[in-house]
Amino acid sequence: MKKIVQRTKRFEKCFGKIVKKQQLLFLKKLDWFLVNEFDKRLTTHRLKGKRKNEYSFSVSDDVRAVYTKEVVKNKEIIVFTFIDIGTHSKVY
């Protein structure tokens, strides 16, 4: 199955605000994510409430990346759209 990663303008803006070390860590974890979205090292989980159609994974102890997932079955494509990144208290 083909996987496509997109990033919103909001994500790009927030990504630019986190420290370089966290940016590099996100890129490393994104590689793991693309191999297995639910890799135990990522602690990926579905969000609740108003954000029930969104998912999150841990970049570090306090930094989270929030994304949505769309499966296009007839073309066997998964589109991951990253919508936010930042500290736990900021993104939730």
Image (cartoon, rainbow, N blue to C red):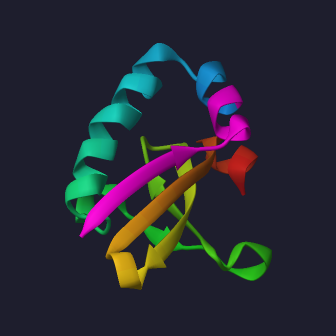
Q: Is residue 77 left or right of residue 9?
A: left
> Given the current orientation, which residue lies at the most extreme left position?
35
**Looking at the image, residue 30 lies above or below residue 74:** above
Image label count:
0
Left or right: residue 88 versus residue 6 is: right
> In x, y percent, where is residue 57?
45, 57
User: x, y percentage for residue 69?
Assistant: 51, 69
Quadrant in the picture for residue 51 = bottom right
When the figure is inspected, residue 17 is found, relative to residue 9, above or below; the finding is above
Q: Quadrant of the N terminus?
A: bottom left
Residue 62 at x, y percent in the picture: 53, 43
Residue drawn at x 37%, y 63% is 43
Q: Quadrant of the image for the C terminus?
A: bottom right
In the displayed structure, 52 sits above or below 81; it is below
Q: Which residues fall within the magenta stretch?
A: 1-13
Which is nearer the eye, 40 or 2? 2
The answer to whether residue 21 is magenta is no
Instruction: Please tell me which residue is depicted at 65% across the width and 39% down the height of the picture.
Output: 11
- Residue depicted at x 31% and y 65%: 37
